[in-house]
Amino acid sequence: MSLTVLAPAKLNLFLHVLGRRDDGYHQLQTLFQLVDLCDEVQLQVTDDGLISRDPPPADPVLAALPDADDLTVRAARLLQAHSACRLGVRIHVRKRIPAGGGLGGGSSDAAAVLRGLNQAWSLHLPLPELAALGLQLGADVPVFVYGRNAWAEGLGEQLTPVALPPRWYVVLRPPVAVPTAAVFGAAELTRDTPPITMIDYHAGRSHNDCEPVVRSRYPQVAAALDWLGQYAPARLTGTGSCVFAAFATEAQARQVAGRVPAGSQAWAVQGLV
């Protein structure tokens, strides 16, 4: 059996760091907007019980990862062990979501494997069970397992589905990758933002606490925010390096994306509802 699953990217419409836990992880508050920039995760079920990437991803950074460190392989092995399934799978990912951009591509690919193999292996596990498995792989994985826009708290795994208005976005990736660990480990990162409500968000009382850190350390990201900010309010997604701005129409988004500075990439994407 062969199955292809779409793995959408996400935007963090805001990202507040409320505090640091005793285990070193951070308490967060964010609003996830899924968008139609998608990887394609192709799953070829096998009878031999083996799990592998075939062929390795085209992205040279991801291709260099051993299978044991690849999130899609880890997701398949975790599900196989959890369900005691004797089937295997060959995984091929057609990447469109850039790595290191704060768009959640690796987490989304892992969630696509969990959802796809739940179907392809005829496991029939409920989504909350798959999401709990996904949390073992990363805090962003559960939102992709559910496949819904969500208000998130805790590590980002405490999810409340939300309805967001139809909207187009320009996502701009400057020519730099930003390591998440470095941002969350920065001494200057604000870690005491008070929690907000959805009413606060709609009133404009939100921001991304990681943005000042990334602006000061990565001038390419600062330049991308300033450039995109000429057309609409621009914000960092996650820890970056991608930045985004919202537009009312597809035509407006495509017009701005077509003007992207040399050396950067841009996409006009539609928010999923």
Image: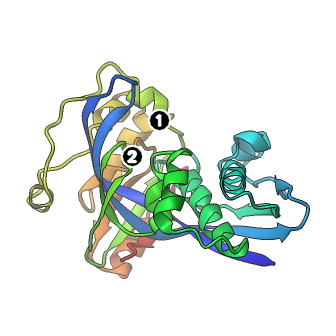
Q: What element carries label 1?
A: helix
Answer left or right for 108 relative to 159. right
Q: Quadrant of residue 270?
A: bottom left
Q: In this view, does 212 lie to the left or right of 268?
A: left
Q: Position of residue 11 (x, y in %)?
A: 39, 58
Residue 238: image tag: 2
Residue at image coords 26%, 74%: 163
Q: Quadrant of residue 190?
A: top left
Q: Mark 1 points at which residue?
A: 180
- Of label 2 and label 1, which has the lower sequence position? 1
Name above or below for residue 106 compared with residue 246: above
Residue name at image x 57 percent, y 68 percent: 125
Tell me the CA gap for discs 2 and 1. Answer: 8 Å
User: In the displayed structure, does residue 52 sit left or right of residue 105?
Assistant: right
Residue 95 placement, left or right of 22 = right
Near mark 2 (Cα within 10 A), the count class, few <14, some 14-19 or many ≥20, is many
Quarter of the image with the N terminus is bottom right
Residue at image location 79% in from the left, 77% down from the top? 2
Q: How crowded is mark 1: few (under 14 residues within 10 Å), some or many (20 or more)?
A: some
**Residue in front for this viewpoint, 134 or 246:** 134
Q: Quadrant of residue 160?
A: bottom left
Q: Where is residue 143 in the image (x, y as percent from the top left)?
A: 43, 59
Q: Can residue 129 be seen in this view?
A: yes
Label 2: state its secondary structure. Answer: loop
Residue 154 location (% of width, % of height) = 31, 43
Q: Residue furthest top?
A: 187
Tell me if label 2 and label 1 are in contact, CB under 8 Å: yes
Q: Which mark is residue 39?
A: none
Three-letter code for the amino acid on which mark 2 is drawn: Gly
Query: Which part of the image, by quadrant, shows the C terminus?
Result: bottom left
- Can I make out residue 262 in this image? no
